[in-house]
Amino acid sequence: MLKTRIAVLVSGGGTNLQALLDAQSRGEIPSGEIVLVVSNNEDAYALTRASNAGVKTAVVSRKVHGEQFEAVLLETLQQAEIDLIILAGFMCILSKEFTTSFADRIINVHPSLIPSFCGKGFYGLRVHEAALEYGVKVTGATVHYVNEIPDGGAIILQKAVEIQEGDTPQILQKRVMKQAEWKLLPKAAEMVSKKLLLGE
Ligand code: GRF
């Protein structure tokens, strides 16, 4: 295997996907290649970002596939000979059966310093609302391995981001993305791709 074959799973806007694609085009992910983007939502703008970058796309949704959702997802990934799955704003919780079939080969980015403000119900703006409500002075982002526990897998990378006077959840979300998520995810993609290439 010359490069780790990467699939990025998305549901929405895809700014983290964009950060990965941009890093790849700058040569910052030499050990891996993004060969597929899968969305569970056919309207996700992330699909347009993938097409613009010449990356193959697929839509696999619970709406269409119902109970077969994970089986179809797995087959789509296996057919593309995917080695590493990156969850970048993918709004579906994956079962234990699925995560164990890709053990240590699924990573996710979460917009807080785990174990704060994470787990079930902590997604999107809710994470930043909770950080502001609590009054923490520092938050950040975490890239971690994915297991069946939401945000519960081993931590790979973290980066702190300061909270500023007058922050709203929206302002904070943007700062955490810009200062942490968009930097950490490509870095982790390269680290884990390299590790898989070396068979570690
Ligand atoms: C990001 O905040 C990410 O941490 C979370 O979902 C959001 C996705 O945003 N898991 P985008 O689609 O990458 O713009």
Image: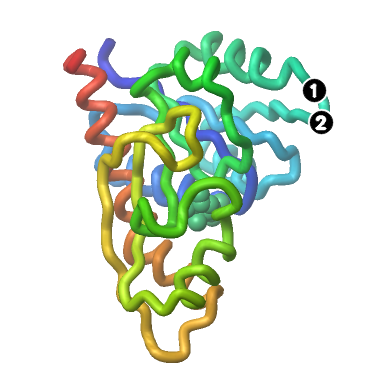
| 24 lies left or right of 119 | left
50 or 117, nearer to the observer: 117
Vertical side of 198 occupied by 17: above or below: below
- The kind of secondary structure element at disc 2 is helix
At which x and y percent is residue 73? 62, 19
Three-letter residue code for mark 1? Gly
Q: Farthest bottom residue? A: 166
Residue 113 or 197: which is nearer the viewer? 113
**Looking at the picture, how far across and down is residue 63, in whole percent?**
81, 31
Dot 2 corresponds to which residue? 63
Task: Judge the density around disc 1: few (<14), some (14-19), many (≥20) Cα neighbours within 10 Å.
Answer: few
Residue under numbered circle 1: 66
* Tag 2–tag 1 contact (CB < 8 Å): yes
Task: For residue 182, say whether it is visible.
Answer: no
Query: What residue is shown at x 52% (from left), y 27% (from top)?
Result: 36
Point 20% across, 13% down: residue: 199
Mark number displayed over residue 173: none
Mark 1: C-beta under 8 Å from nearest atom of ligand 1:
no
Q: Is residue 150 above or below residue 168?
A: above
Residue drawn at x 45%, y 70% is 131
Q: Position of residue 20 (x, y in %)?
A: 40, 44
Nearer to me, 113 or 46: 113
